[in-house]
Image (cartoon, helix red, strand yellow):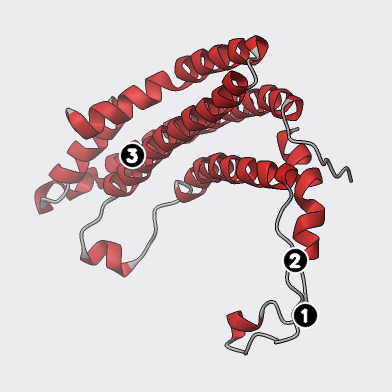
Amino acid sequence: MLWKTIHARILDFLKEGIHPGMLNPVFGLPVPKDVPKHRGPSPNERYWLDWFREFSEINNSMERLTHSLVYLSSYPKSKAFHFHRLSEADWLRYHIEAYLNEVYILHERLTRFLRKIEKVGIAARDKSALNSVNKLKAVVTASLKNVVRARGGHVHEQRFDDTELANLGSLVLITKSSELRPLRTLRQLQYLKALQKWRRQLLANNKETQKLCEYVFEEANTILIRHEPPGISRN
């Protein structure tokens, strides 16, 4: 809903900026000299361009969380991984830790987004908006606190771990010995077990996080429309 509103408000301004030769610099060509000067955005357009940037940052985090499932699909059979002795456990742990970090980033971006909306409500003396923002803050904190706590503990206290990853790490270590290499089948099974667990977990987390962001955007959309500057261009 919020994206539809933003798109409708800034579309005319963006379309007016399209001109022949606008991509010349990308291909190393000179910029045309007869390009008409693009008008500056109206107060309404400037307002929504600002919120477009905020929306984009949150949306980018959501996309990266989705990408994490792709990265976990399979352990690369690259000679470089073998050369640098990067095991399945290293591969799995790296992407899980990256996922936790991206959830933390999403939490920070949502928090900043809500602070900016709160300022709009304060400026307009809109008690309804402020009540909505306080409710949204509580929902965001409650929804992401477990992952944020896990990430915080990983960074500030000790390395993130769980039973499956710990078991896999142990098997990777002991199967480096030639005498225990027959256990590599068990190591592969443990890797698949850990992989399946985390793929299910990340998929479930992403579904809930998507619902959370949609809820925040829907509530924000109502507030932002209510206090947008005059000069609306409806498409």
**Residue identifier under label 2:** 17
**Left or right relative to 22: residue 58:** left
Residue at image position (70%, 86%) is: 32
- Distance from Cα at disc 3 to Cα at disc 2: 41 Å
Is 59 drawn above or below residue 217 in the view shown? below
Residue at image position (48%, 31%) is: 112
Is 30 drawn above or below residue 222 in the view shown? below
Camera sees residue 160: no
Q: Residue 48 in the image: x percent, y percent?
A: 69, 42
**Left or right relative to 158: residue 234:** right
Of badges 1 and 3, nearer the viewer stands: 1
Residue furthest right in the image = 235
Badge 2 local density, few (<14 within 10 Å), some, or many (20+)? few
Q: Residue 108 in the image: x percent, y percent?
A: 43, 32
- Distance from Cα at disc 1 to Cα at disc 3: 45 Å
Mark 2 falls on what kind of element?
Answer: loop
**Residue identifier under label 3:** 97
Name the N-terminal-most of marks 3 and 2.
2
Mark 3 falls on what kind of element?
Answer: helix
- Distance from Cα at disc 1 to Cα at disc 2: 10 Å
